Image (cartoon, rainbow, N blue to C red):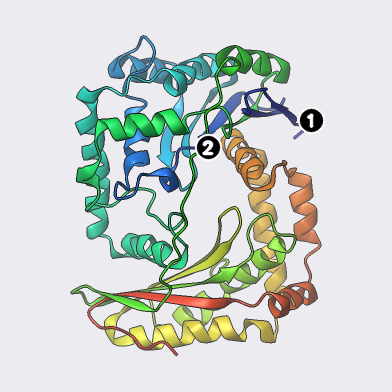
Amino acid sequence: MANQEICIHTFDNGLTLIVEPMADVQSAAFSMLLPAGSVYDPTGKNGTAAILSDLAVRGAGDRDSKQLSSDLDNLGLQRSEGVGGGHVTFSGATLATRLPDALRIYGDVVRRPHLDAGQFEAARMGVEQTLTSLIDEPRQRLFQELRRRCYDAPWGRPSEGTLDELPSISVEDVQQQYKSGFRPNGMILGIAGNVDANEIQTLVGEMFGDWEQQPVPEITVVPADRRHQHIEHDSTQTHIGIACDSVPYKHERYYDAWAAVSVLSGGMSSRLFTEVREKRGLCYAISANLNSLPNEARVICYAGSMTDRAQETLDVTMAEFRRLPNGIAGEELERCKARAKSALVMQQESTSARSSAMARDWFHLGRITSLSEVRDRIEALETGTVLDFLESHPFKNYTVLTIGPTALDVT
């Protein structure tokens, strides 16, 4: 697929626009990152950003909530709103010819949302229902609680909010978060598809060029309590979470870290799946992923087991982590590389995946990695370099969290 050169433009007010024209597709997609994520939630009011991401699309400009949704649906826009640690994100994909109209509507969402007090309770209830559903989903609750324990606050704060703090949030809190977080300085807009970069830059300049910068809110960091902990839950199952330190996405050895984690958990032939589930039948689910913040990262591992096999599941899983530096077979690494290259092909064909990847790259790296660069980095991986990485950057500072009827021993 022949792509034109990626175009990057930072406006005087700090907004960064990234456009990758893709001449061989008919669609176009955008990923819009606003620096108003959960790390900026006021103390004691975790969930403010989550409510804001919902409330912002309940009417904007001269459209009420119903008209806004109708106009976006008429454009055939596949859209989503979400909140993460650093950002509130709006994204969408449609036919390339309809992208300008979609962007104009989101210009209203970003700069002229109603944030109507009459819609506030419905938005808050939506967040509450999402959080309530986690109570019945121990696996999701485990991920949420493990992040809270392995990352310093506010970076470990649940992006969806918490049930105990949700009632204290007012519409005024949400409006204030909008004022401080929906700002051009720190905003990133990634666009990929069959578009003309110059035309898009002109349009975005008309929409956002006169938008004034706002001060960047300060963040107070509170160290995490990384002790091994247990949450009691009456069940026949035990959910096990393991977190340990690694290197972030911007680190020069990131791809070595990625490869190491992929050997552990990169498909049904990976070590954790083979050793813990297939050979021993200890668990019904197991996985590990490399999770990155701007300046730090964790390997996050999950295992779900019947309670009577939970202790052995934890022991064997920890043993697999510890024996990884002892050696990696060439075929193990080659399987990881093959999966990664297949994923690159699919990303190359997806405007949505590409627009979000570019926005993510700019946030983490301050530059864009081309698909060919990623492919070259993957191709260059060798077992020796990965093992050298594990020696110089060993997995360390383990945090173990379990949810189930009985606490486990961590050795």
Q: Identify residue for label 2.
A: 216
Mark 1, residues whose alpha carbon is within 10 Å: few (<14), some, or many (≥20)? few
Disc 2, disc 1: CB below 8 Å?
no
Q: What residue type is labelled 1?
A: Glu
Counting from the top left corner in percent of width and height, residue 318 is at: 50, 83
Q: Nearer the viewer, residue 252 or 172?
A: 172
In the displayed structure, 149 sits above or below 73; it is: below
Q: What residue is rendered at 65% in x and 56% in y? A: 249
Which quadrant of the figure has residue 12? top right
Residue 5, labelled with which disc? 1
Q: What element carries label 2?
A: loop
In the displayed structure, 411 sits above or below 348; it is: below
Counting from the top left corner in percent of width and height, residue 367 is at: 72, 41
- Can see residue 279? no
In the displayed structure, 320 sits above or below 197; it is: below
Mark 2, residues whose alpha carbon is within 10 Å: few (<14), some, or many (≥20)? few
**Labels 2, 1: front one:** 2
Q: What residue is rendered at 26% in x and 31% in y? A: 171
Counting from the top left corner in percent of width and height, residue 410 is at: 41, 87
Rendered-image quadrant of the C terminus: bottom left
Q: What element carries label 1?
A: loop
Whichever of callouts 2 and 1 sits on the residue coming sooner in the sequence is 1
Rendered-image quadrant of the N terminus: top right
Q: What residue is rendered at 28% in x and 30% in y? A: 172
Counting from the top left corner in percent of width and height, residue 243 is at: 48, 71
Q: Which amino acid does label 2 sit on?
A: Val
Which quadrant of the figure has residue 7? top right
